Amino acid sequence: MGRLEGKVALITGAGAGIGRATALLFAEEGAKVMVADFVPAGGHETVKMIKEAGGQAAFVEADVSKSADVQRMVNLTVDTFGRLDILFNNAGIQSKFMMTADTPEEAWDRIFATNIKGVFLGSKHAIPVMLQQGSGVIISTASAAGVIGLPGTGAYGASKAGIISLTRTMALEYADRNIRVNCISPGTIMTSMSPGAIDPENVPPFHQSQAMRRFAQPGEVATVALYLASNDSSFVTGTNTVVDGGYTAGVPKQKPKKPATG
Ligand SMILES: NC(=O)c1ccc[n+]([C@@H]2O[C@H](COP(=O)([O-])OP(=O)(O)OC[C@H]3O[C@@H](n4cnc5c(N)ncnc54)[C@H](O)[C@@H]3O)[C@@H](O)[C@H]2O)c1
């Protein structure tokens, strides 16, 4: 029996990267998965992959920065699968690296609308369902950039720090109503968003300083999301789990002779 048997999960940004890897893993562990993304092609592909593996999934097109889309995405999850046990607020965007004074207001607003307002809206619309059910789990994807300063990522890092703060507040607000709220802060993960994936030969120096001297695969974040979604973490709420190969632990003392294995 899977660790999420009988559970219903709604995952945003599930058409690619970390969201897709998590959708596949949750389905493999028995969850019915609502795949949400504002890019239909990626979302449909994730659903196809889940079904081919014998799991249950459906797709909803939704932009997490738009309240009406998010309300519809939550409603459709309940209408399709009967409940909503796990919300994974994972959709997020990054921009090119820009010093603060060079950051256009439009870029700042766009990043905040998706990254932090998206988490707020997802939680706002899912919590009433969870309160009615008497239980629920909310997980959000923050970032190592929200834990430490990173030159050139002011808007992104500030939005992700906001997710860590909102996670703690919501955890306190709903702990006695059986809703657990946690977030995950990945380091550099090999997805379309990571500089390592886009241009492996030209990664900014701070991205190369992870103590384990390698970038992670999306599945290495998905396994942490599974832990937070399942009863394995039944007494865990209000936390930020860093998944960064030691990146935020400090400056690596010396370069290891060979990469640490995953
Ligand atoms: N890749 C990394 O190195 C890294 C590091 C730290 C944090 N993160 C965070 O992980 C999360 C997932 O990113 P990823 O690396 O898998 O990137 P990705 O680009 O592979 O996937 C992101 C998905 O989110 C979707 N999306 C973006 N904006 C959306 C919106 N407004 N509404 C709905 N869907 C939207 C995209 O279409 C895409 O399918 C993001 O929140 C990102 O900030 C990534």
Image: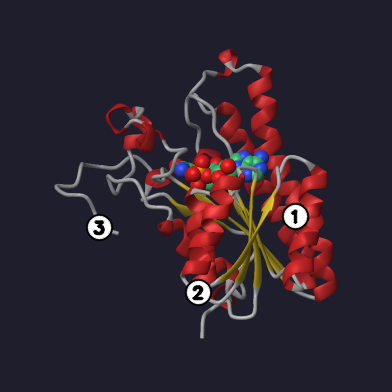
Q: Residues within 10 Å of mark 2 (few under 14, many from 20)?
A: few
Q: Position of residue 9 (x, y in %)?
A: 64, 66
Q: Going by the image, does 73 lie left or right of 39? A: right
Please name the residue that numbered disc 3 is placed on: 261
Q: Position of residue 95 (x, y in %)?
A: 54, 28
Q: Is disc 2 in contact with disc 3, using a CB cutoff of under 8 Å?
A: no
Secondary element under disc 1, as helix, strand or loop, is: helix
Task: Check residue 98 in the rendering and tell me which mark sits there, or answer none.
Answer: none
Alpha carbon separation for disc pair 1 and 3: 38 Å
Identify residue type, mark 3: Thr
For image coordinates 77% across by 67% down, the residue present is 78
Task: Report the front residue among 223 and 258.
Answer: 223
Residue 86 in view: yes
Query: Which one is in front in this view, the residue at disc 2 or the one at disc 1?
Result: 2
Q: Quadrant of ligand 1?
A: top right
Please name the residue that numbered disc 1 is placed on: 73
Q: Position of residue 117 (x, y in %)?
A: 73, 41
Quarter containing the C terminus: bottom left
Alpha carbon separation for disc pair 2 and 1: 23 Å
Identify residue type, mark 1: Met
Identify residue type, mark 2: Gly
Q: Going by the image, does 204 lie left or right of 55? A: left
Q: Going by the image, does 216 lie left or right of 127? A: left
Q: Going by the image, does 240 lie left or right of 81? A: left
Query: Which one is in front in this view, the residue at disc 1 or the one at disc 3?
Result: 1
Secondary element under disc 2, as helix, strand or loop, is: loop
Task: Check residue 54 in the rendering and tell me which mark sits there, or answer none.
Answer: 2
Residue 14 in view: no
Q: Who comes first in sequence, dot 1 or dot 3? A: 1
Q: Is disc 2 in contact with disc 1, using a CB cutoff of under 8 Å?
A: no
- Residue 62 sits above or below residue 11 on the image: above
